[in-house]
Amino acid sequence: MSRATARVMASTRSAIAITCALLFLGCTSAWEDSFTSSGESVPARNPDALVVLREVPWDRLSRTLDEIEQHRIASDVHPDEWNEQQKLEERAKLLRGLQVSSDPRRVTVLGRSSFLTTYPVRPEDGELSDFARRIGATMVVWSSSCVGKTETIRQEPVTTWEHGWWSGRRDGSGRHSRGSYSESSTVYVPIVVQANEYAFVAYYLREE
């Protein structure tokens, strides 16, 4: 497991239960729930504006993030104190890792989402694009990888049947009748199951 994968898992492990529950209930988007802003702010875009979605290989992104981390560790100056040229060089390295060929001077990195989930996630289903428009992004570059098995709680239906006899008057004749009946009821109970766990990372870009 690369350090980049380990960082994604470590930074989001405590939020897995919340994220999965919200996904199951349909209350929010995991992309929005796990978003970390870079501090850059741009105007939102129109609801029908085009957002380009691109997928990049997980190994490529992991190598790039590891290189950026090692460069930061080796620097005698904290990244917050870097000059514009140093920040531009790091942005250019990130964009190369994301396979974005645009001039880094014209691209703003708005932030990223990173989360782990055992629930199906489809970046093309509209949720990712909708969130990207709200924060002003023109492009989202994402990647995912299966990071192994984990235990998760699923709601499973359990059906029970009840059988019996009934008796009583069926008409005004005073005669008694008797018969059998069967009734079913279904409840959902939480059970622990083994499921594949996937890591997702997405970077939000604004090209001027």
Image: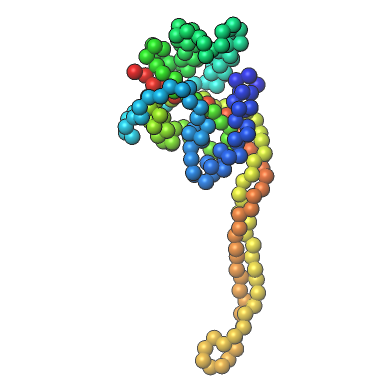
Q: In this view, does 141 lie above or below 22?
A: above
Q: In the image, is residue 157 above or below residue 59?
A: below
Q: In this view, does 126 lie to the left or right of 150?
A: left
Quadrant holding the N terminus: top right
As drawn, the residue found furthest toward the bottom would be: 173
Q: Which residue is at a point 58% across and 32% down the rendered structure image? A: 116
Q: Is residue 67 visible?
A: no
Chosen colour scheme: rainbow
Task: Say if residue 187 shows up in the picture.
Answer: yes
**Closer-to-camera residue (165/83):** 83
Residue 72 placement: quadrant:
top right
Looking at this rendering, what residue extends furthest in the front direction? 81
Asked which quadrant contains residue 48, the reply is top left
Q: Residue at x 47, y 8 (%)?
A: 83
Taking the spot 65% from the left edge, 71% from the top edge, the residue there is 163
Number of numbered discs: 0
The x and y percentages for residue 91 are: 47, 13
Residue at figure coordinates x 48%, y 34% from the top left: 32
Q: Whole-percent x and y of residue 132?
A: 41, 30
Identify whether 164 is placed above or below 62.
below
User: Which of 72 and 50 lies nearest the eye of the viewer?
Assistant: 72
Q: Looking at the picture, how far across and down is residue 92, in whole percent?
A: 46, 11
Q: Camera-side residue: 57 or 111?
A: 111
Task: Name the image quarter holding the C terminus.
Answer: top left
